[in-house]
């Protein structure tokens, strides 16, 4: 395979900076992102992630829009979107994201959309590097996972939600 010299130089720069150890990591990482983000299906203005069309909006603009809404409305909007995601997973992929064994599918989808990093530890959902308002994420997670969550702690960059009970 012929790789343009500019790409070789870029990979070498990443290695020099300690971002990766080998060129191979860059190539494998790029292929993994290509697969996860379904870049093979991208053709402006159509971008797909997880089988869903996405619209790219910069974080600053989206946060500005969210800041114009009251916290309760943000949580409701997140819940509405979470129900939409849950239903699409069920109908299109046959995956019930309210089944705890499938929670990883749901939170990986949100992570791939740039919403943040999600870790489920026992009865808590940790969200770090959140790209959206945590009230919005709170509502979305409740609907997507089919649980009632309580905010344990949150700040600008992270939130921890405790699972209070399974909704039903």
Image (spheres, rainbow, N blue to C red):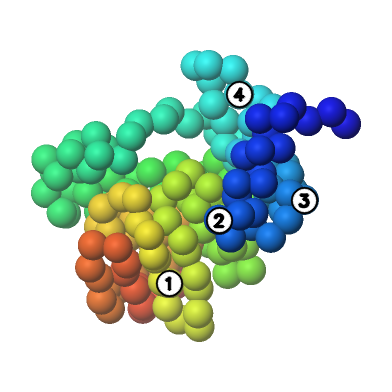
For the residue labelled by badge 4, is the local secondary structure a helix, a strand or a loop? loop
- Distance of label 2 from label 3 (alpha carbons): 15 Å
Q: Which mark is residue 24?
A: 3
For the residue labelled by badge 3, is the local secondary structure a helix, a strand or a loop? helix
Structural crowding at the residue carrying mark 1, measured as other residues with C-alpha within 10 Å and reported as few (<14), some (14–19) or many (≥20): many
Q: Earlier in the sequence, mark 2 or mark 3?
A: 2
Callouts 2 and 4 close, C-beta under 8 Å: no
- Distance of label 4 from label 1 (alpha carbons): 31 Å
Residue 79, position in %: x, y? 34, 51
Q: Given the current orientation, which residue lies at the most extreme bottom position?
A: 122
Q: Can residue 156 be seen in this snapshot? A: yes
Q: Which mark is residue 42?
A: 4
Q: Earlier in the sequence, mark 3 or mark 1?
A: 3
Q: How many marks?
A: 4
Going 27% across and 78% down the picture, which residue do you hit?
A: 152
- Distance of label 2 from label 1 (alpha carbons): 33 Å
Q: Can residue 165 be seen in this snapshot? A: no
Residue 95, position in %: x, y? 65, 52
Of labels 4 and 1, the one closer to you: 4
Structural crowding at the residue carrying mark 4, measured as other residues with C-alpha within 10 Å and reported as few (<14), some (14–19) or many (≥20): few
Q: Which of the 4 image quadrants contains residue 160? A: bottom left
Answer above or below: position of 107 versus 81.
below
Q: Which mark is residue 139?
A: none
Q: Which mark is residue 17?
A: 2
Of labels 4 and 3, the one closer to you: 3
Which residue carries the number 1 mark? 125
- Distance of label 2 from label 4 (alpha carbons): 30 Å
Callouts 3 and 1 close, C-beta under 8 Å: no
């Amino acid at each position: 395979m012929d790789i343009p010299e500019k790409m070789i130089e870029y990979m070498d720069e990443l290695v020099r900076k300690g971002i990766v150890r080998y060129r191979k990591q860059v190539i494998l990482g790029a292929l993994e992102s290509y697969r996860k983000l379904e870049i093979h299906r991208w053709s402006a203005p159509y971008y797909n992630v997880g089988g869903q069309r996405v619209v790219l909006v910069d974080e600053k603009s989206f946060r500005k829009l969210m800041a114009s809404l009251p916290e309760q409305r943000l949580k409701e909007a997140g819940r509405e979107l979470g129900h939409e995601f849950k239903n699409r997973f069920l109908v299109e992929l046959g995956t019930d994201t309210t089944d705890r064994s499938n929670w990883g599918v749901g939170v990986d989808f949100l992570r791939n959309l740039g919403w943040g990093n999600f870790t489920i530890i026992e009865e808590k959902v940790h969200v770090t590097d959140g790209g959206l308002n945590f009230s919005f994420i709170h509502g979305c997670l409740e609907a997507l996972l089919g649980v009632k969550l309580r905010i344990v702690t949150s700040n600008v960059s992270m939130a921890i939600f405790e699972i209070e009970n399974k909704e039903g």
